[in-house]
Image (cartoon, grey):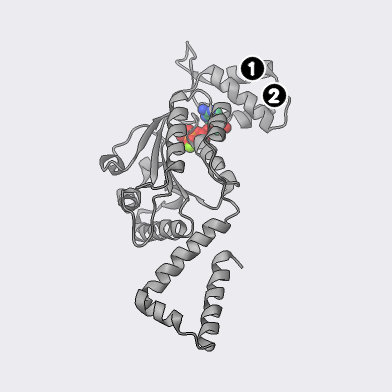
Amino acid sequence: MNVLHFFTVLFLVSNITLAASGLSWLDEVLNILGREMVPYFLETFISMLNGFFDTDHLSFDSKRLRADLKGSLFGQHIASDVVLKTVSSFMTDSNPNKPLVFSFHGTTGTGKSHVTKIIARNLYKKGEQSKHIHLFISDLHFPDKRNLDTYTAQLKQWIHGNVSNFPRSMFIFDEMDRMHPRLIDTLKPFLDNNDNVDGVNLTETLAMVDYCCGFSHSSLINKHLIDHYVPFLPLELKHVRQCVMAEMVHLNMTQDSDLADEVARDMPYYPEEERIYAFKGCKSVRQKLPLYK
Ligand SMILES: Nc1ncnc2c1ncn2[C@@H]1O[C@H](COP(=O)(O)OP(=O)(O)OP(=O)(O)O)[C@@H](O)[C@H]1O
Ligand SMILES: [Mg+2]
């Protein structure tokens, strides 16, 4: 039985007990507050309890986030700086007035999804596995234009339900450039300065929007709903080398800098002659590395 069910049952039982023992104070309180407000109070009360008892909640530490970014995000000094400052400020703001909304821009394999995972493991004990992280991939979750009405309703319901259950939720919208404008419109009220969207407050919520193909003229941008545009720079050979060294640890291999050089050099770079920027960033480094064992 989860916390929500437990306290709903407790509430009902205590209600019956009070009524049976002739105590009418609860009746009077309910009359003053208005009985129609009971579901609202119950929902707020339960969401507070859920937050309190949630075992996945990790208390925020900006020094830990700084060290994590420094140790595991390579070649992205702008992204690192923006994320550290803005997440730290948002997490320590006792009265935020809007959800924190990032949009990440950059070519493939430069660390957009990676940084989302770094933020996640600094907010939740279960990191990227946390049930409070909700990932939407346009082509996967909203593939068929004919079902737009259903998708719109589901998306609304999904955000509403999850945030009222746990305000410090995180939503990730991948491939935003491929999302239908009507679905983007559905997101607008949630990402705006609204204290309350249909009875749910999103001011503790985080949203990350990934644009795989660089800048896009999305209506979210036009409506100024995005707080921070974060550019991801192309990665160079030295960064790919750092990624290889990190993957060696991940794969329980002994770190070997000569091997890291070899693996990094074997990746494709552009321009063809100068070979300065990695075509795929650090993507598939993990998959390539076992071939060199
Ligand atoms: N800047 C980086 N620092 C450290 N590791 C990185 C970096 N960029 C990428 N990686 C590694 O490469 C993997 C793939 O990168 P990631 O998924 O973050 O790319 P992406 O920018 O989201 O690309 P796409 O646009 O294709 O989604 C990551 O899981 C991570 O291990
Ligand atoms: Mg990605």
Measured in 3D between alpha carbons, the distance from the residue under mark 2 to the one under mark 1, in whole angstroms, is 9 Å
Question: Where is mark 2, residue-wise?
Answer: 292
User: Is the residue marked by circle 1 packed among few (<14), some (14-19), or many (20+) residues within 10 Å?
Assistant: few
Q: Nearer the viewer, residue 122 or 216?
A: 122
Q: Earlier in the sequence, mark 2 or mark 1?
A: 1
Quadrant of the rendered image containing residue 154: bottom left
Q: Quadrant of residue 163?
A: bottom left
Q: Could you tell me if the residues under marks 2 and 1 are in contact, i.e. CB atoms within 8 Å?
A: yes
Q: Give the residue type that dot 2 points to.
A: Tyr
Q: Is residue 59 visible?
A: yes
Q: Position of residue 16 (x, y in %)?
A: 53, 83
Vertically, is 196 above or below 218? below
Split into 4 quadrants, where in the image is the C terminus? Answer: top right
Badge 2 crowding class, 10 Å Cα cut-off, few under 14, some 14 to 19, many 20 or more, is: few
**Above/below status of 151 relative to 124:** below
In the image, is residue 53 above or below residue 290? below
Query: Could you say whether the residue bearing mark 1 is in a helix, strand or loop?
Result: helix
* Image location (x, y in percent) of residue 45: 47, 65
Q: Secondary structure at mark 2?
A: helix
- Residue 75 is situated, as x and y percent measured from the top left of the image, at 50, 22
The label on residue 148 is none
Rendering coords of residue 87 (x, y %): 45, 38
Residue located 45% across and 85% down the image: 24
Residue at the disc numbered 1: 262
Instruction: Give 283 or 126, whichever is nearer the viewer.
Output: 126
- Residue 267 visible in the picture: no
